[in-house]
Image (spheres, rainbow, N blue to C red):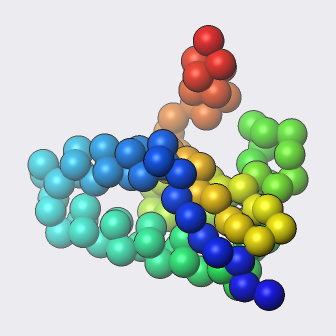
Amino acid sequence: MAHEVEWAESATVALIEQLDFINRDSPSYAASLSLKAEKAAASLDHFPYRGRAVPEYDDPTIREIQVGSYRLIYQVTEAKVWIIGFVHVARDLARLLEQSDE
């Protein structure tokens, strides 16, 4: 059964911010990254568990796949895959999560 793939607003904003930043120096790389992110997300419709579990979460339904230098973080539910984050691999995700809880 295929899952519907949907981007959370926060993940969309994170992707756009990264693309805007990259676009300043390399419009072609920004365009390439955008296509790769969209393609990676779309691939989750039939293979939602292909990514690894995110170590910073204690929840096997929250998974990630790497897109270039970024982590595409998503949550698998019964019928949907929610894209919930797009974070550079150099960022400390645990710290970002702590800051969002404050």
Classify residue 33 as left or right of residue 65. left
Q: Position of residue 30 (x, y in %)?
A: 25, 62
Classify residue 43 as left or right of residue 3. left
- Give the camera-side residue of 65 and 38: 38
- Give the camera-side residue of 92 and 98: 98
Residue displayed at 54% across by 78% down: 42
Q: Position of residue 46 (x, y in %)?
A: 71, 84
Q: Is residue 26 above or below residue 43?
A: above
Q: Is residue 19 above or below residue 49?
A: above
The number of discs equals: 0
Q: Is residue 93 visible?
A: yes
Identify the residue at the far top of this view.
102
Residue displayed at 75% across by 37% down: 56
- Give the camera-side residue of 78 and 87: 78
Q: Is residue 67 above or below residue 101?
A: below
Where the C terminus falls, by quadrant? top right
Residue displayed at 50% across by 64% down: 67
Q: Is residue 72 visible?
A: no
Classify residue 99 as left or right of residue 67. right
Residue displayed at 45% across by 67% down: 37
Where the N terminus falls, by quadrant? bottom right
Q: Position of residue 53 (x, y in %)?
A: 79, 55
Q: Position of residue 71 (x, y in %)?
A: 55, 53
Quadrant of res 58: top right
